[in-house]
Image: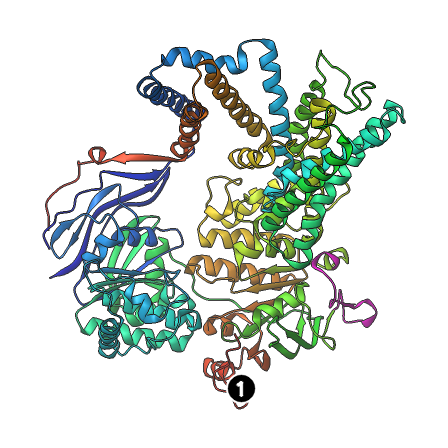
Amino acid sequence: MTNTHHEPLMRIVKRSESTFKHKVIIRLIAVLLALVIDAMFIYFVTGLNPFAVYTTMFQGTFSNPMRFSWAMRDLASLLLVGIALAPAFKMRFWNIGAEGQVLVGALATAAVMVYYGGKLPNALLYPTMLIAALAAGALWGFVPGVFKAKFGTNETLFTLMMNYVAIQLVACCVNIWRGQASGLGKLNMKSKAGWFPQVFGQRYNINLIVVVLLVVLMYCYLRYTKQGYEISVVGESENTARYAGINVGKVIIRTMILSGALCGLTGFLIVGGRDQTISTGTAGGNGFTAIIVAWLAKFNTFYMALISFLLIFLEKGAGEIASAYNLNDFASDIIAGIILFCILGSEFFINYKPIFRSSKQTSIGKEVA
Amino acid sequence: MEYAIELRHITKTFGSVVANHDVSLDVRKGEILSLLGENGSGKTTLMNMIAGIYYPDSGEIIVDGKLVEIRSPKDAYALGIGMVHQHFKLIDVFTAAENIALVLDKQEKYNLKDIKAKAQQICERYSFDIDLEQKVYEMSVSQKQTLEIIKMLYRGAQLLILDEPTAVLTPQETEKLFAVMRNMRADGKSIIIITHKLHEVLSISDRVAILRKGEYAGTIDTAAADEASLTELMVGKKVELNIEREAPVNPHLRLNVHNLTITNAEGIKVLDQVSFEAFSGEILGIAGISGNGQKELLEAIAGLQHPEKDSSIVYYPDDDRDSTAEQLIGKSPKNIRDMGIHLSFVPEDRLGMGLVGSMGMIDNMMLKTYSEGHSPLVDRKGPRYLAEEIKDELGVVTPSISTPVSRLSGGNVQKVLVGREIAAAPSVLMTAYAVRGLDINTSYTIYHLLNEQKKSGVAIIYVGEDLDVLIDLCDRILILCGGKCNGIVDARKTNKEEVGLLMTRLAGKQEGGVA
């Protein structure tokens, strides 16, 4: 055979441990690259001035304190669900049912507001709402947990189907509560019973305080507690867990109750602190977006906060571009998508590096024996 | 001299780890070359570069006198190089012939009849024993391996690389494989075989190439080698290849297993009325062809199985007084631990049962002890100290004690596991294939550790596959066959033939396989 082979043009090799500086540089390059590609897209496809579009995008979150505050409000909802999913995912329990778990938590909160608002003093009403929401979310997590632990059912399908049950329940209750009205307005509009008090000028600031607390607490729970350790072991191998004397079924059920209850808490915060009403769209897709957040952060809650922020920033920016330049939504989504793609793609280069043909060392003797 | 392949100054690094450094070796046409080296010495990496899985950082590969670039397994096939990996690359639901069809070149037509005819020719030529119509999932490990080799020959391989082919075979199957290998050599093919078993190296190969810590340590003619000289070349210093065995001191009854019967999920009795006693200060060997109930036996004692009703496993703490005896059946591993019984268990599946692969040494140290104490938080101070100690004492090679253990080489993984189980100060120590896949030096370290435990009064149950070692190391040997106890022999008075016969002979049944 004649030798027509050459060294491959490019091959991929694993890096040794990356330094912090190196990681920062790679991510900066990714952002720059994204901006360049986006600039070309903006200039050639939409015909706009890229710099003006970037400024507008930035304004989506940062143009004024109000915008920033809204971004933080939406970030809180997304991040909370991500935190709720972290223990389940760490256990390799694919909880796709966060959307439903948030909804039933929201529904329980709303139900307490509808039936007990004005009848109970606020000091009692809030705890009742909270407990109802936690219990409802926990139940939505408990059911697939038990079936997985006892019968080995597939949790992905199970949790997914539970979402639809939750949506129908909410639709049914909304129909009952709205009476003759065309839609369900804010609950307890006059008495404001069950509405969160304003903190620093906004009701939803309570949500932010809770989410900051939970970022720290969940991080510690997964990392430093015995229960967190058990979750890691069960997630890695059930056989190893049994060998270690861990009651696998108990850990699965307990963790799913926790995950569901935290989703329920999110529902409570959304209804009490943000919407003061409920609809089938209350969870707003956060239950699914949060899966991306949790995965990308490898279940580290601090990274989750950063990734949530990025997603919210891009979402707000895309919306702002669309309205400011009268672009269609798809174009603005492409602009945001390119940025996301580059930043996520850069993760690959943190662990691997490409080696090109010319870089091969040629100092070695060429003679053939 | 004509060479099938020549490697010149091959270097390969993974991050900061140097797997191969400046390795030069050659394989002649029509020879069997053994590639020998300790765990992690870079044998598999080197072979993967020939097979096109990895690309070398620097160095040259010369096939048939021509400088070549092997960028992918496809390039390797084209050059007549075929590798049989430790983990087979077969499709379970396909038949043997369909799996062979998978290696067809793009230009070749898919015609199963032709493929079968051609494969049948290969089988006859080298006397392979295989049914081309059989589905892979119905095959034994040995048949799958045979199929892999046929696949490579079908593709026109002139140089075959076999990565630890005998690790999963019984002695009889190994003999069959060697016969086939000799046939291939007679036909002018070259073979590189990786194995840790020195007696196999001596019996099958023409020359032996040795790697030490990623570097080439030399090639010697097998005729001029013996076990001691090979070990010395491999390790870099003289190693004592004798297993000491002292008489048990003051043995007490520690475990009394009676009528142990286990039925698996498919309703098959994997253990059938097994009864035996294990004493402190003694090593009880368990011999048997893999899959004859060894795994279930150890797991039952560890509390991981659900034995049938009449089974009994009684544990005696200090002496054989019945008053302090404890029944272990029906207890979970945690129950057993809470009773103050220190059972240590080195399971066969190291990363799937004994350790958590994604965790470092520290977190793995506390796998069985993490729940001690009332604090809801885990205490990593003790485990960190223990990890450091095991790393130093057993010479575990790892970048750090927080590096995930799945990234360590097989020998180091086993050291971590055995180290932890011994550090738990057990009264019963069970090991399943403790030296499987380990190089000779590490194996002797493990034998030595077991002997130390024996001296300190631990009852040891050693499930092994190497009959020479079982006979040299153990005090008594229990032979399992088809889930039944086929006898318990005195290791000092028995021989390989007797044990081998008991392993395969069962009333009215020749082969003792259950699975």
What's the residue at 9%, 52% (across, down)?
A2
Camera sees residue B457: no
Q: Compared to B366, does A279 lie above or below?
A: above
Q: Is residue B406 magenta?
A: no
How many other residues sit within 10 Å of disc 1, few (<14), some (14-19) or many (≥20)?
some
Give, as a three-letter code, the residue at label 1: Leu
Answer with left or right where residue A346 lies relative to residue B344: left
Q: What span is in magenta?
A: B315-335
The percent coordinates of residue B412 (x first, y second) are 48, 51
The percent coordinates of residue B300 (x first, y second) are 66, 68
Q: Compared to B440, does B276 lie above or below?
A: below
What's the residue at 66%, 46% (across, down)?
A162
Instruction: Give the residue at mark 1.
Output: B506
Answer with left or right where residue A34 lies relative to residue B342: left
Give the letter of the chain under mark 1. B
The percent coordinates of residue B286 (x first, y second) are 56, 73
